[in-house]
């Protein structure tokens, strides 16, 4: 009890005294959740002893149910890409509410430049730039244009946060509304479908997972071993100290938000390719799912604490929960309630763990 | 003399109405929905073809409160009539009351309001009878499965739209009602889940279902987008699409293209442009003081590979 009243907060926090990295806790939580689903599958009578992760019917070469392992990762890969950018923003102590809307706007714009000339043998007259003859363009065109959209949106976010000093919540809220407006305005709400084969290949099969994995590995290294990463953590831990130690905080914040915008654009390209369509409503709530993945993965909303590995594990937990609910055929109504409870539970656990770690030191 | 005076006033009245444009306020539930966009464009196009009809279309962004505010703003700016595509079909009482007390004609379009049976004077609903769509689709699936010789037992997955949406609830109930009939009771539901009308969510959900390895014969979806998502997931898993019956509702362009490719078996055409134009006509009739049925139904139409060509340029 005295420990609590005389708590020193994070001031005496010492890495050497830490018994285990926080990511390990997240990983253990992941194992625990998988185990719960596995056990429930065995206990519940209507499941007929079906296994969650293992192949009980001899359908696959390995002992695992490979189809389920794949979908667990595949269904979170795209939001996972967004979460990589959101993680960096949160590490600076900020927040990015605009990523879902950037996904919508970028998907619409990029897809418009990826249209095929013919659908089922007749000219694709509803292609967005049919009159200009911009159909069957090389895949590089929609990809580069999409990336530019994300970079510009992210840059605007960054400039607003860094130079006007308005809170990130408001700056990115503005972008959230604006970018969604752009997504709807671009074709007046009409969906854009029928991409070229080369564009459709970007999100086909398990490619979204590979793209997510490569980007996660890349940003893990960047955050851990480069000046960019160290400055991001420094700003999130104490912005004034970072400024006084010579970091150009404004320029760095701008860069972080721009990168987050670019990652949202990559997610948009992969998503529209995977679904073979772009729609103005795409990506709604993705920003919150991405933030939830980061938070479940142990990224502190106060900034400065957490890692890309945590976010990747957070994404996996999300995937396991989604697949687990379907596996148990849990009623649709309960799924959302349970998901919300798990998100809040993860943060409560994290707070509790932080307080305990602070007391221990 | 009296007659000529009357005729003159009538002519003057006609003149003023044709010179003074009739402002019609339109509040759509949301802009970024494919079907509602076709409906909205149907309304805008038929207004463009008329003299002296001005539409002011607003986006309620799926927000009940925002929609009511828009209606009150329309009333305050003195529009001739209001057309509402309700965000929430159970939140229409307040809208009806606001329009009725201001004496402004009100037409609900596409989504049947909860007070459809007790609409005040000068109000109407234009849409399709939602009971038809799910029934048509499920019954066609039942017939296809029977024709494929599966009448001794068939497994079915059901993809549901947003659970808070009346169309999703109704279509799912229609499926259940068909499955409960003697002719179609051989179909049994393995699982039913929501994919929130979304292609991406349906694709993920279907892949999850496939991962259980359970045999199935049909996927009944509340709309086309989710049916297409399911088709994409099944094709990715290497399932032969001629062995599975997939049904949707809406007859969107993407769905018709999927049907031409042999992936989608059944969809149901809801005449969006017809509903939009019909709603505008009802509103103008109400303004002119003509009698309008309080429920104007635009029928659903079944679309199969045999009839798909007729619908390619429809929605």
Image: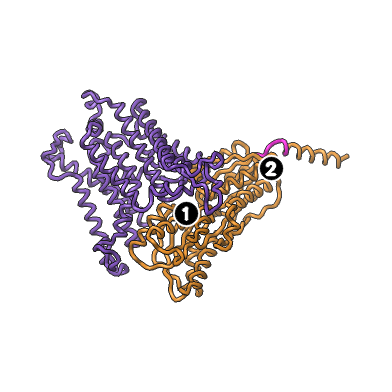
Q: Nearer the viewer, mark 1 or mark 2?
A: 1
Is residue B260 shown above or below A193?
below
Q: Provide the chain ID for the residue under circle 1.
A: B
Label number found at residue B138: none
Measure the alpha-carbon separation of dots 1 and 2: 34 Å
Q: Position of residue A281 (x, y in %)?
A: 45, 45
Residue at left offset 53%, top offset 50%: B35
Q: Nearer the viewer, residue B128 or B37?
A: B37
Q: Position of residue B205 (x, y in %)?
A: 38, 57
The residue under label 2 is B50
Over which residues does the magenta segment extend?
Answer: B18-22
Chain B rendered in what hue? Answer: orange
The chain that appears purple in the image is: A
Considering the image in quadrants, where does the C terminus of chain A appear? top left
Q: Position of residue A290 (x, y in %)?
A: 33, 44
Is residue A66 shown above or below A282?
below
Q: Quadrant of residue A106?
A: top left
Magenta-span inclusion, residue B237: no
Disc 1 secondary structure class = helix
Residue at left offset 61%, top offset 46%: B43
Residue at left offset 52%, top offset 47%: A117
Q: Quadrant of residue A232?
A: top left
| Residue A156 seen in this snapshot | yes
Label number found at residue B225: 1
| Residue A272 seen in this snapshot | no
Is residue A342 shown above or below B55?
below
Residue at left offset 33%, top offset 30%: A254
Category of crowding for the residue at label 1, using alpha-carbon neighbours closer than 10 angstroms: few (below 14), some (14–19), many (at least 20): many
Compared across the picture, whether B203 is left or right of A314 comes to right
Compared across the picture, whether A5 is left or right of B162 comes to left
Residues at discs 1 and 2 in contact (Cβ within 8 Å)? no
Disc 2 secondary structure class = loop
């Amino acid at each position: 009890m005295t420990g609590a009243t005389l708590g020193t907060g994070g001031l005496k926090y010492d890495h050497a005294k830490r018994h285990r990295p926080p990511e390990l806790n997240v990983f253990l939580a992941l194992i625990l959740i998988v185990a719960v689903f596995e056990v429930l599958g065995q206990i519940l009578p209507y499941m007929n002893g079906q296994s969650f992760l293992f192949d009980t019917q001899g359908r696959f070469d390995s002992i695992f149910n490979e189809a389920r392992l794949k979908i667990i990762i595949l269904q979170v890969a795209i939001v996972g890409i967004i979460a990589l950018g959101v993680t960096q923003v949160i590490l600076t102590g900020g927040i990015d509410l605009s990523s879902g809307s950037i996904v919508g706007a970028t998907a619409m714009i990029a897809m418009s430049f990826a249209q095929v000339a013919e659908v089922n043998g007749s000219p694709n007259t509803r292609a967005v730039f049919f009159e200009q003859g911009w159909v069957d363009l090389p895949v590089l065109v929609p990809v580069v244009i999409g990336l530019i959209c994300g970079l510009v949106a992210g840059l605007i976010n960054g400039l607003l946060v860094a130079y006007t000093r308005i809170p990130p919540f408001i700056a990115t809220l503005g972008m959230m509304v604006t970018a969604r407006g752009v997504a709807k305005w671009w074709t007046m709400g009409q969906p854009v479908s029928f991409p070229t084969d080369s564009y459709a290949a970007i999100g086909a099969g398990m490619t979204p997972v590979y793209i997510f994995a490569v980007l996660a590995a890349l940003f893990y290294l960047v955050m851990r071993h480069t000046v960019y990463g160290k400055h991001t953590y420094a700003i999130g831990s104490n912005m004034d100290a970072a400024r006084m130690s010579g970091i150009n905080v404004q320029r760095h914040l701008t860069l972080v938000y721009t990168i987050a915008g670019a990652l949202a654009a990559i997610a948009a390209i992969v998503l529209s390719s995977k679904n073979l369509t772009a729609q103005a409503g795409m990506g709604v709530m993705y920003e919150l799912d991405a933030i939830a993945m980061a938070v479940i993965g142990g990224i502190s909303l106060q900034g400065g604490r957490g890692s890309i590995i945590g976010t990747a594990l957070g994404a996996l937990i999300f995937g396991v929960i989604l697949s687990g609910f379907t596996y148990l055929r849990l009623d649709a109504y309960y799924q959302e309630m349970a998901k919300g409870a798990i998100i809040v539970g993860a943060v409560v656990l994290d707070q509790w763990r932080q307080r305990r770690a602070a007391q221990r030191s | 003399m009296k007659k000529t005076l009357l005729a003159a006033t009538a002519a003057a009245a006609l003149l003023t109405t044709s010179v003074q444009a009739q402002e019609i306020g339109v509040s759509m539930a949301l802009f970024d929905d494919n079907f509602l966009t076709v409906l909205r464009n149907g309304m805008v196009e038929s207004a463009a073809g008329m003299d002296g009809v001005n539409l002011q279309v607003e986006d309620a962004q799926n927000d009940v409160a925002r929609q009511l505010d828009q209606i009150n703003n329309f009333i305050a700016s003195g529009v001739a009539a209001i057309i509402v595509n309700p965000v929430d079909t159970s939140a229409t009482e307040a809208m009806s009351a606001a329009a009725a007390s201001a004496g402004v004609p009100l037409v609900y379009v596409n989504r049947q309001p909860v007070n459809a049976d007790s609409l005040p004077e000068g109000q109407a609903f234009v849409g399709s009878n939602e009971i038809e769509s799910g029934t048509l689709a499920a019954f066609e699936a039942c017939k296809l499965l029977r024709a494929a010789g599966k009448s001794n037992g068939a497994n079915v997955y059901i993809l549901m739209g947003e659970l808070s949406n009346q169309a999703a609830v109704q279509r799912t109930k229609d499926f259940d009602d068909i499955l409960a009939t003697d002719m179609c009771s051989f179909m049994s539901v393995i699982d039913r889940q929501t994919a929130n009308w979304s292609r991406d969510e349906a694709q993920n959900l279907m892949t999850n279902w496939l991962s259980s390895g359970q045999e199935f014969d049909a996927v009944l979806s509340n709309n086309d987008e989710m049916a297409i998502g399911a088709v994409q997931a099944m094709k990715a898993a290497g399932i032969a699409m001629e062995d599975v019956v997939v049904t949707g509702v809406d007859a969107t362009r993407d769905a018709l293209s999927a049907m031409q490719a042999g992936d989608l078996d059944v969809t149901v055409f809801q005449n969006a442009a017809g509903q939009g134009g019909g709603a505008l006509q009802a509103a103008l009739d109400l303004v002119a003081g003509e009698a309008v049925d309080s429920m104007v139904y635009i029928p659903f139409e079944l679309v199969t590979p045999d009839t798909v060509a007729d619908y390619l340029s429809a929605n």
